[in-house]
Image (cartoon, rainbow, N blue to C red):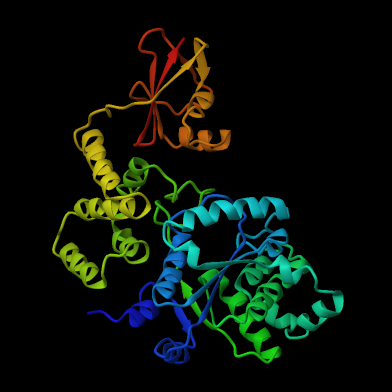
Amino acid sequence: MSDPISDLLDRGTVEVIVREDLEKKLRSDKKLRIKLGIDPSGADLHIGHMVVIRKLKAFQDLGHHILLLFGNFTGQIGDPTGKGDTRAAKTQEELEENAKHYIDQVSKILDVDKVEVVWNADWLKPLNFADVIKLASNFTVAQMLERDMFQDRMKKNKPISLHEFMYPLMQGYDSVALEADVELGGTDQTFNLLAGRVLQKGYDQEPQNIITVPILEGLDGKIKMGKSEGNYIGVSDEPNDMYGKIMSIPDDLILRYFELATDVSAADIDKMREEMSKGANPRDLKMRLGRELVAIYHDEKAAEAAEAHFKQVFAKKELPDDIPEKTISESELPLIEMVRLIDTVSSNSEARRLIEGGGVRVDSKQQKDIEFVVPVPEGEGVLLQVGKRRFLRVKRG
């Protein structure tokens, strides 16, 4: 039998600060306060976001108190993105609306009825200027500039706004306000998580322990999973889309996805690693991975149906039986507008990327000309295919 505490500390973690201290607390009878902070800058989650949510679930399963903190104050300022620019701020109303969608989506993993949801505007908004000065006195400018993303900005002569130095102070003060015992985050949050330890010491609290988790690569296997990059698997994706996306990942990501995104045991993953080293077909493992993920975010029946759909459409090179249809009044339509008829294509820029990337077919013929105008004949109309999994028959009526 595996040890759930060792699994929590070892599986899918990059750094545990301070491991000996945290393990001692976990093996005691103390109920710990586990904090995860989220600035809900967007409404949709993907399985990369869920890596840290799954770690939160491991704490919940051990009986600890989960604090899901939404940055309805910090999100208005924006944590530096690491992409060389200042992140665009959101209004408090936008952030709180997005947070509602977050809660719905994390409920697929967490028992949200046993989660304490908190909002950092409750304690950050009342702070006065003297309070902010007190917070700032705990850090030096040199310490702030040690942050990797600030170093990158300076090398590229990109501006660093003074307010961005305030973000770690606010996130750290969140830990003070909540008296957090443990804070979780991605590796890109390490600096902010450590700021919590510094401020807790300054306020005579025991410094929180920290667990950082890896940043999951997207479907391209190269960069961080993200909606803006078009390389993501959405928590709310339909089963067929979710399964099909998994089948497209590079072979060298298979085991990493199993470890970070599923409940498959470490022993099973070791067996798969051995099988791959002996020449096992990666496609078989991807099919299992697809079933596992669809079952987590939908159910077993949906996973079986998604696999059957994939086999029919792709393994047998057949069209699906249930191609959705849309009727338009026009006899022709610009290709970009036609691609936008697919529900999951949310913008003209996304449609343009799909077309230029060779991901659009019209009546089975690849079409990469963004200026192309699609004729829509009477009767059967025209068959549109976007990517490998999305079909739409457009008819004139």
Of all residues, the one furthest to the front in this rendering is: 113
Q: Along the horizontal axis of the image, is 37 left or right of 46?
A: right
Is residue 20 shown above or below 370? below
Q: Which residue lies furthest to the left in this view?
A: 278
Q: Where is residue 121 in the image (x, y as percent from the top left)?
A: 72, 65
What residue is shown at x 66% (from left), y 68% (from top)?
A: 155
Comparing 336 with 366, the one in front is 336
The residue at the point 22 percent across, 72 percent down is 267
Quadrant (top left/top right/bottom left/bottom right) for the N terminus: bottom left
322 w.r.t. 68: above or below: above
Left/right of residue 153 with respect to residue 251 in the rendered view: right
Q: In which quarter of the image is residue 257?
A: bottom left
Q: Is residue 332 above or below residue 324?
A: above
Q: Where is residue 393 in the image (x, y as percent from the top left)?
A: 39, 21
Q: How many marks?
A: 0
Outermost residue to the right: 129
Measured as percent of width and height from the top left, residue 47 is found at: 43, 56
The residue positioned 45% from the left and 29% from the top of the image is 368
User: Residue shown at 49%/63% (left/top)?
Assistant: 113
Please tell me whether residue 297 is drawn above or below residue 12 in the rendered image: above
Q: Nearer the viewer, residue 130 or 25?
A: 25
Residue 81 coordinates in the image, percent (x, y): 62, 61
Within the image, what quadrant is residue 261 found in? bottom left
